[in-house]
Image: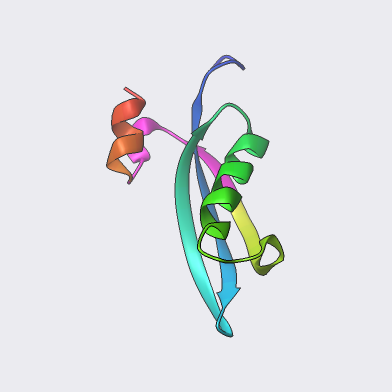
């Protein structure tokens, strides 16, 4: 893969809301890992959470065939 290619990242983590720990897994397309993290944080904080309530546990690059999100998979082909 060249460095200027768009990759698919799967970001897994947890956030705290109403005294409960909630697991999340998001798939995003981004150029760099930092961009993927920023996109995921933006999506999750749009439901009224603060960034300090979110903990990212794992970030991995996946193939388009591994993507569970249909739109992400189709855009990557």
Q: Left or right: 65 with respect to 18?
A: left
Q: Which residues are magenta?
A: 59-68
Quadrant location, the C terminus:
top left
Q: Left or right: 69 with respect to 23?
A: left
Residue drawn at the location 59% of the way across and 15% of the way down: 4
Q: Is residue 41 above or below residue 23?
A: above
Identify the coloring: rainbow
Q: Is residue 29 above or below residue 38?
A: above
Q: Quadrant of residue 15?
A: bottom right
Residue drawn at the location 33% of the way across and 27% of the way down: 75
Residue drawn at the location 68% of the way across and 60% of the way down: 51
Q: Left or right: 75 with respect to 16?
A: left
- In the rendered image, the residue lying farthest to the right is 52
Estimate the x, y position of residue 20 in percent, counting from the top left: 54, 82
**Closer to the camera, 25 or 71?**
71
Estimate the x, y position of residue 70 in percent, counting from the top left: 28, 40
**Closer to the camera, 60 or 21?**
21
Estimate the x, y position of residue 56 in percent, counting from the top left: 63, 57
Residue 60 is covered by the magenta coloring = yes
Residue drawn at the location 58% of the way across and 39% of the way down: 36
Estimate the x, y position of residue 33 in percent, counting from the top left: 63, 36
Residue 28 is covered by the magenta coloring = no
Report the number of numbered marks. Answer: 0
Q: Is residue 72 above or below residue 49?
A: above
């Amino acid at each position: 893969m060249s460095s200027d290619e768009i990759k698919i990242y799967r970001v897994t983590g947890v956030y705290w809301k109403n005294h409960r720990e909630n697991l999340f897994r998001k798939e995003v397309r981004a150029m760099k890992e930092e961009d993927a993290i920023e996109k995921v944080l933006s999506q999750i904080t749009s439901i009224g959470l603060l960034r300090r309530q979110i903990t990212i546990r794992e970030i991995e690059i996946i193939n388009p065939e591994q993507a569970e999100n249909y739109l992400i998979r189709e855009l990557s082909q």
